[in-house]
Amino acid sequence: MIRWLSRGSLIVALFLLALGAPAPALAQGPCGVVDAIDYPLDPERFGIAYPFGQPSSRYDGRLHTGEDWFGGRATTYGSPVRAIAAGRVTYAAPFGWGRDKGVVILEHLMPDGTWWYSLYGHMEELNGYTFPAVFTCVERGAIIGAVGRPRPAPHLHFEIRNFGPDSPGPGYWGTDPVYSGWRNPSQFIQNWRAWLHPAHAWHAELTDDSGPRFPAIIRADNATIVFDDGRLKALNPAGAVLWRYIMAETLEIVAVTPYEGSILVADYGGILQRWSLEGGFIEQWRLPTTTNDAVFTWGNLLVVHDAASDTLIAYGPDRAERWRVPDIPRPVSVTPTDAVLGVMSIRGALTVLGPDGRIIDRATLRGAGDLTPALDGGLIVRSRSALWHVDPAGHWQRLADAPPVQQGTVALYSRADGRFFLYSGLADQTLYAYDAAGRLLWQTVLPDLKGRPFLLAEGDTLLLADGYGQVITVDLASGAVCDQLRVWGGRAADAWAALGPDGILRLHIADQMIGLKWAVLTDSCH
């Protein structure tokens, strides 16, 4: 095995150790520290006509260093532009961009001790709105000019960067602007709004903006291990990186999951690796089959789906095969309980197995369905038309009619007390609560959710978080919305959440892991 590592046939391991020294006391800037942040224009009236990082044919394919905000030809010109946060004026020139009009730059000291500059371009002094004087302080929301009329139409060019306090800059850049100090302005504002929330404990910026491929693992010491862009990465309880290992590009990772007190990394070709929770490679072995992303533990069994033969295979702690079940199409979800394993495959094929691999029941639903554990160790099943209880013996009982749902954004979740919750998705964006017998307890509309939410319940609160960045807490007794915040997300992102023993909610959305104080986040639900 040492020879395999030294030849580098599968991985390159990089170990970085950070002890997380205490942060120095935050100095006060000349205009204070940012405690709130907003957009420069009303996002309900203005939209982004040209986004950050988009190449421009007009500028030889160079990439946009900011965002262009536009609200319509009849309403944009002359609209007041506001400071996004408290800061100091470092540049103000009505003709800073010549024919492309004026520029104002503000300097901001953030609560984490970092300095950032917000730039507002293509502005004019109109309608009584004048540029502020250099070196003066402005408050959040202060009017610092008006949207001007540059070439070709009125719009605001808005930037966030960590350099250039006294230069308007080029507006476009030849390489990725992020690597040169610019940031996506809307992402910066949206995330800082969340980071300024009273529940915020820490955050860690990740690389993969598609969100969690696999659930993170929380160690007993409250460190969090996450898979990010081909790397196993451990974050300490304050969100700083403890170590990271880069997996080889030759590996096609299909699963990262806890296994025998360690981390199991599975490759499509059947290669399995164990990594220590404390950091470090342990061992590797190979399965006799290929596999897909259905690699998981069930009790003391390691279960994999053979992609070539559509067979589900279970291995014991000694890695000997315990059982195999043929004719199971590729799973889209698996739901293990203490008594049964529910496997939902493509085209609505449902297989219910016992721990010994015995087929308890097979059924084909009309369209895709959803599963969640039931109080007795069986399953709650959502089909197109109904909600069902399947007991551990395979007996089906109809509980209730299923409400209309939008496939792809629907979510089903259950609690240990038997209550279960169904979010309809974009069909009507309604969250339904049922008791164990299928009686409707309450329903509430959640119009801000756009994607399939991750659901988690603790105490008297239910949390929903989607890949677009919406985070909503709901009172379990009444269905009332308690609190809501938003981090940066997107159409292609996913969400995952888990509550650690330290009372911190780990929330992974898009390219960030954020730690939120559960007691503060859910305080209004109590």
Image (cartoon, rainbow, N blue to C red):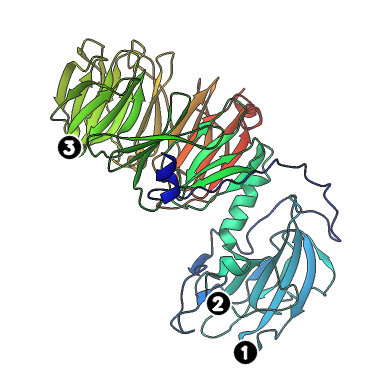
**CB under 8 Å between discs 3 and 2:** no
Residue drawn at (51%, 84%) of the image:
152
**Residue type marked 3:** Arg
Q: Which residue is mark 2?
A: 173
The answer to whether residue 211 shows anywhere in this view is: yes
The residue beneath circle 1 is: 99
CA gap between label 3 and label 2 equals: 47 Å
Sequence-wise, which precedes: disc 3 or disc 1? 1
The type of residue carrying mark 2 is Trp
Q: Secondary structure at mark 2?
A: strand
In percent of width and height, residue 108 lies at 75, 61
Labels 3 and 2: the sequence-earlier one: 2
Q: Which mark is residue 347?
A: 3
Q: Considering depth in this image, is 154 or 277 the residue closer to the camera?
A: 277
For label 3, the crowd category at 10 Å Cα-Cα, with few meaning under 14, some 14 to 19 and many 20 or more, is some
Question: Label for residue 159?
Answer: none
Q: Are marks 1 and 2 in contact (CB under 8 Å)?
A: no
x, y percent for residue 293 = 31, 39
Q: In percent of the image, x 29 and y 43: which residue is there? A: 268
